[in-house]
Amino acid sequence: MNGLLEVSGLTRRFGGILAVDSVSFAVAPGEILGIIGPNGSGKSTLFNCILGQLRPTAGRVRFAGREVTGLRPSLLSRLGIGRTFQLLQIFPKLKVRENLLAAGQEHRGSMLSRLFGAPDAGLAGAVEEMLAFFRLAHLAETPAGSLSYGQQKLLDIAMAFMAGPRLVFLDEPAGGVNPAMLAELEARLRALNRERGATFVLIEHNMEFVMGLCDRVLVMAEGRVIAEGTPREVRADARVIEAYLGG
């Protein structure tokens, strides 16, 4: 198994409950991989085991050829792995520009350099670039809490990219976003993938969003991978239909 990310036999038990059951997959550079499955299928636990929020019971995770199993999220971030959460990680009372600056400062320099360096930590250019790329420049001086939910989602993803990640995990990016804003979100993710070579792994319940965006889809049920393939292949797989519709 070769890829930017390699997951081998990842397992997580909670007492007698097997939440993730020997899951293996790889993600190629520049790929967009979707992970779908019914509620309780193990998707979020899998994410948390890969990203350091939980330590796996068994199995390995490798990133860019390096063993990263069980590393803390802060260390994974420094290696080039970013993440968004179901609950937005923005600062509602700060302006949009200030949110981006705060996200960038978290990943740059030491505490001393942040205390005594330039007020913008040399990030002004990167902030302007993110504002333009995510089409948020006209909202730069607006408190983040005043944005629409879809705009807040865009800001949340823009904040993740302030660290310049090579791989980003997106946890339900389409959740709660209205259809018009969802099209903009998909367009921005496609542009990140096409223009910046960004690699994505996403959990999502919006099937149309997944099938339209992803190169490949992995389907989980009861902690196991039950199907994997292109969106067309997965959509037609009897095991997937049974998992979602109960036969």
Image: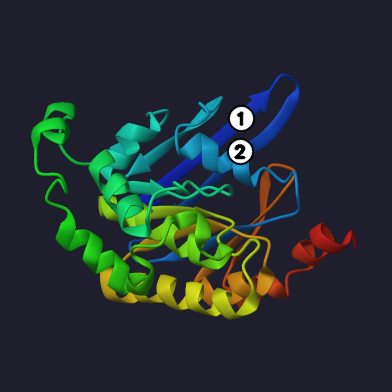
Q: Residues within 10 Å of mark 2 (few under 14, many from 20)?
A: many
Q: Provide residue 53's location: percent of width, then percent of height.
A: 50, 31
Residue at horizontal 45 percent and vertical 48 percent from the top: 93
Residue at horizontal 32 percent and vertical 47 percent from the top: 103
Q: How is the image coloured?
A: rainbow
Dot 2 corresponds to which residue? 45
Determine whether label 1 and label 2 are within 8 Å by CB: yes
Q: Which mark is residue 12?
A: 1
Is residue 4 among the parts visible in the rendering? no
Q: Provide residue 194's location: percent of width, then percent of height.
A: 33, 76
Q: Is 60 on the left or on the right of 141, as rendered?
A: right
Nearest the viewer among 167 and 24 is 167
Return the residue found at the far top: 15
Is residue 89 among the parts visible in the rendering? yes
Return the residue found at the far right: 247
The Cα–Cα distance between marks 1 and 2, rounded to whole angstroms, is 8 Å
